[in-house]
Amino acid sequence: MERLGDDTGPIDVHDYRHGLKLLKETRETSHWANKKPYACPGCDEPFEQLFVSEKTHNAFTPSSATPFCIRHEEDRILLFRH
């Protein structure tokens, strides 16, 4: 299974666009579904959805107790929901 990104720098989500489906996008956030599926860079397991945010503060209301991984980059966070 192909891994989303590597450890050499920021993940360019658009490089993986053919395997992701954009669910919602605002000026500072984007929410994607993993169609391919790609492996999570945190745990190497497939993830269901990816939330990318450039905002300083984010609030999440989970619909269930699903596991997630977080990747912190210089200007944003990426939350991988499994």
Image (tube, rainbow, N blue to C red):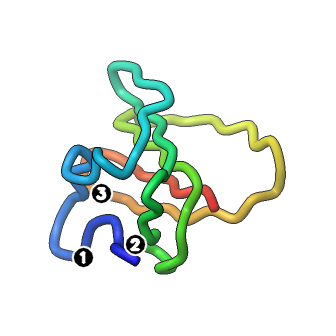
Residue 42: give its label: none
Q: Tell me which residue sits at (41%, 38%) in the image.
A: 53
The kind of secondary structure element at disc 3 is strand
Q: Are marks 2 and 1 in contact (CB under 8 Å)?
A: yes
Q: Amino acid at mark 1?
A: Asp
How far across and how far down the image is residue 35, in percent? Answer: 48, 51
Total tally of numbered discs in the picture: 3
Which quadrant does the N terminus fall into? bottom left
The kind of secondary structure element at disc 2 is loop
Quickly name the residue at label 2.
Answer: 41
In screen coordinates, is 60 left or right of 74? right
Of 31 and 54, nearer the camera is: 31
Q: CA distance from mark 3 to mark 1?
A: 11 Å
Q: Closer to the camera: disc 2 or disc 3? A: 2
Q: Tell me which residue sits at (60%, 56%) in the image.
A: 81
- Of the two numbered discs 3 and 1 on the same chain, state the one appearing first in sequence: 1
